Image (tube, rainbow, N blue to C red):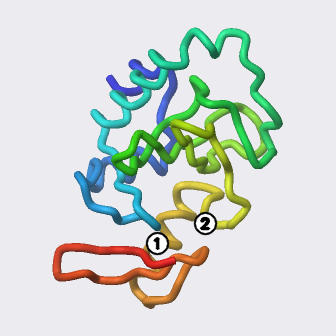
């Protein structure tokens, strides 16, 4: 149903992730302050962004698909995490060679893409996050810090 709502199938790594935990509420698991969205959150975030930017998208320039910056929003982006301030991590599913990379879709500045390998794909991000949590070592400048038994923070 969510795939129909956003008009494209979810990539297999996202499906596997959603089947495992379907989001995580308001817990900042991904560095430095991102919470994974569940199926309903993905659908709602995508629909909200399309309402905001839908009219603009018709004639909008997509920018360089391999570049550091993208447009404000694109219909082929799938939001996967949020920061509680109106910004999303997205999977860029536009059909080109870097398909599946992760971008930071900021509601004020547009979308940016980091060259760090952990942002190359959802599996890379989840693996880098798990490794940082297991080893306590920083990843892309973010160091995991246990605030208490139930809360994680990231120092940078």
The residue lying toward the viewer, choosing from 128 and 149, is: 149
The residue lying toward the viewer, choosing from 12 and 85, is: 85
Q: Quadrant of residue 93?
A: top right
Query: Height in image: 118 above or below 44?
Result: below
Q: Quadrant of residue 66?
A: top right
* Circles 1 and 2: CB atoms closer than 8 Å: yes
**Element class at badge 2:** helix
Instruction: Please give left or right for residue 37 compared with residue 136 in the image.
Output: left
Residue at 47% across, 43% down: 88
Give coordinates of residue 17: x percent, y percent: 38, 53
Give coordinates of residue 147: x percent, y percent: 25, 81
The residue lying toward the viewer, choosing from 148 and 79, is: 148
Residue on which the image places disc 2: 118
**Element class at badge 1:** helix
Residue at 46% across, 25% down: 49
Mark sitting on residue 129: 1
Query: Height in image: 153 above or below 102?
Result: below
């Amino acid at each position: 149903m969510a795939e129909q709502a956003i008009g494209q199938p979810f990539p297999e790594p996202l499906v596997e992730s959603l089947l495992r935990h379907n989001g995580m509420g308001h817990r900042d698991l991904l560095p430095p302050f991102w919470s994974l969205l569940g199926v309903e959150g993905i659908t709602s975030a995508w629909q909200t962004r399309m309402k905001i930017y839908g009219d603009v998208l018709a004639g909008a320039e997509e920018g360089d698909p391999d570049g550091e910056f993208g447009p404000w929003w694109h219909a082929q982006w799938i939001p996967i995490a949020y920061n509680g301030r109106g910004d999303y991590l997205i999977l860029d599913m536009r059909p080109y060679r870097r398909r599946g990379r992760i971008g930071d879709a900021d509601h004020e500045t547009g979308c940016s893409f980091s060259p760090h390998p952990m942002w190359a794909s959802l599996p890379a991000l989840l693996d880098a996050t798990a490794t940082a949590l297991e080893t306590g070592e920083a990843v892309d400048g973010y160091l995991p810090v246990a605030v208490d038994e139930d809360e994680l923070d990231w120092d940078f």
